[in-house]
Amino acid sequence: MEHPTSARASSGSLGASTFMSIVARAKAMAASFGSAEQPSWCPECLRTVAVVMSQDDSVILELRTQCHDFWNACIAIAATPRSPDELRDLHSTFLLRVHACKLQHAERRVMRVSPENMCNVFFDCILQCVLTGLSFGDKAVTTRTKPNQRFNKPGHWPTSVADLFPRGRKESIEVYVFWCCQLFSIAPLYALHTLLRIARPIVFPILLEEPLRAKLVWALVESLEPGIPVEWPGGIAPCTKPEGWQLESWMASPPHQRRCTVGAAVLLDKLLYGPDFGFEDQYYRFAWGYERPMLMAILAAFARMQKSDDDLANLAYTMLASSAGSLCSVLGLPVSRLPSRLPERIRLEVPEPDLSDPNGSIPLLIYGFVVRCRTRRACANSECGLHQLLHDDNRVFQSCGGCKVMRYCSKACQKRHWKMDLDRLPSNTVDLPKPKVDAMPHQIACPVICDLLTKVPLTNARAFERGLIAALASGDITGLHMKILCSMMLVDPIIPALLKGSLHRMLQGQRGYGGDPWRGLGGDQSNIDWKLACDTKFITGGEHTAAE
């Protein structure tokens, strides 16, 4: 099976006869689908379709627009749970199906497969087809992750989020994790990575549930460095290798950059970043309790990999370095304390962990908050919070005509947010909101956001931090601006308590700071030196840990 990220032919590169043959075969397979529990397709025919189809965008586009049944059948088969006994029965069924197919189509060109791994080949191809349908080509649904884009183009598969989870969201995700744990292919890793990219608000919370999280961590560790001995919490590994398991040769080559390692690195990166990533799904929540097994596997894989002059080939190398740095930060482990047996280059290329708060300062908190609001595909009305993916109309949420940052599912929600809790705010807006205030009315916040983005562009986090401090020094951004911006974050329901606690400590002038930005304490914020407050770094105290 071709590696999902291998070089692909340009659109239209197949001959006309081959194009028609593959499209016709895929449509015939859709017509003879049968059931997801007892798929009747020939593994050799399926492999031929999967490999040839992935090489030409025109075939994919034709099937995406003209044969939804093929994709729906593939994803239904992929998302159906299987027991070991059922897989053994399917192996026998596939052997008979291949034999019958050879007799019926002796002249047909197919890619022969070994009879010893018929089930593995079949489900590897099924998952490859799912991956191709979702992410290959210029018009793939994975390219439509911006807030101003609807879920998919009309008439293109998948037509809705429901198409991604034919057996329900949780059960479908559980089956993908099951395939990851079978260690027969990297296609499940890439398929799960693709679902995270398309529907992170749905997929990520499910992956945090136990025992699913433990199983996925185990699969990632085994894929990063197969057979590595690690100490699991409680002394028991979450899973065991499947019967007859062995590292497939195509997953193990080349040794310095195994494809299974690359697939695991790509999925780890998507767990850390990606569309709809927000404050509420920090990396430590997935790694919590499994940091050391994961770090050991990442470092072992990283030590084995070799850097080259090819930026694309180095992508997994860079991703593993970033993941190692993130885990070192969670553990509070300086790179200098990594095992001495590791190559010296690891200490040079793994980023030194930042043991301060991940958002560091008030400007960085503001930057993260505004960027999240601008890119988050959900209603800004805190009483609603409906995500664009979950809306039945497959339409784009409209942004505020003033700040162009906040988005709303309806005019009613926008009107509600405009004056929400306005009557409960202090009349002079000098004091920060009282605890009983549930939201900052957008009527107050909108002009402040407009001023902020006009005077301090969102180029990147550090540039924004420097720009905001400079704007405070010049008077372009006032203390009132800062009070309102901080108030927005303190009452935002999405920002977790950890970050609100960081901000609250900054605003109260408590310990852990490089200086005292306050002229007076006792709850009076009118004397805040905002330039000094924004130039102060927050250091996580002993009572402030990742568990919070």
Image (tube, rainbow, N blue to C red):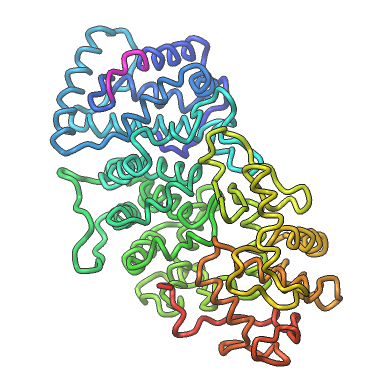
- Classify residue 428 as left or right of residue 203: right
Residue 27 at x, y = what percent? 41, 14
Residue 269 at x, y = what percent? 47, 54
Is residue 89 depicted above or below 477 in this figure? above
Residue 219 at x, y = what percent? 30, 52
Q: Residue at x 70, y 65 (%)?
A: 423
Q: Residue at x 25, y 19 (%)?
A: 40
Image quadrant in which you'd find residue 245: top left
Q: Is residue 310 visible?
A: no
Q: Is the magenta stretch mostly helix, strand or loop?
A: loop
Q: Is residue 150 visible?
A: yes
Is residue 5 depicted above or below 56 in this figure? below
Q: How many labels does the image show?
A: 0
- Classify residue 23 as left or right of residue 368: left
Closer to the camera in the image, 516 or 384: 384
Q: In which quarter of the image is the N terminus?
A: top left
Residue 497: say if magenta. Answer: no
Closer to the camera in the image, 347 or 89: 89
Q: Residue at x 55, y 82 (%)?
A: 539
Closer to the camera in the image, 257 or 507: 507
Q: Quadrant of the C terminus?
A: bottom left
Residue 504 at x, y = what percent? 59, 78
Q: What stretch is highlighted in magenta?
A: 30-35
